[in-house]
Image (cartoon, helix red, strand yellow):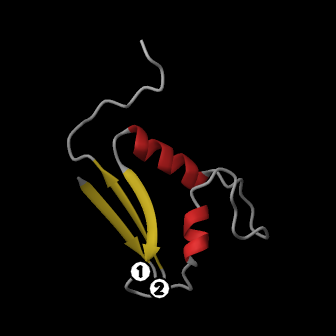
Amino acid sequence: MLEIDVDDDGPGLTEAQRQLIFERGVRLDEQRPGSGLGLDIVRELALTYGGDICATKSPLGGLRMQLRLPASAVPPRSSQSH
């Protein structure tokens, strides 16, 4: 698997917030513009190609976003059966 980790040293998120951020339409800061679709779309794409994405606490104190994708080409999984 190819793994890409992105860490920051910001305030981070609570465990409850980390569980919510990949849900469609969820926006943690209602004062900022956005539709709440970005992380949901990333998650769906990662799953389609046999990978995953998660959010954990960073060793820097903030948030770690971890994207994992197969290292070799894998055809996307189809939601339709033939």
Q: Position of residue 43 (x, y in %)?
A: 48, 50
Residue at 75% x, 62% y is 33
Q: Quadrant of residue 8?
A: bottom left
Q: Can you say whether 66 is above or below 46 in the image?
A: below
Q: Secondary structure at mark 2?
A: loop
Q: Can you say whether 36 is above or below 13 in the image?
A: above
Q: Which residue is mark 2?
A: 9
Residue at 24% x, 36% y is 73
Q: Quadrant of residue 56?
A: bottom left
Of the numbered discs in the image, which one, if any, rests on residue 58?
1
Q: Residue furthest top?
A: 82
Q: Residue furthest left?
A: 72
Q: Amino acid at mark 1?
A: Ser
Q: Secondary structure at mark 1?
A: loop
Label 1 Cα neighbours within 10 Å, binned few <14 / some 14-19 / many ≥20? some
Q: Amino acid at mark 2?
A: Asp
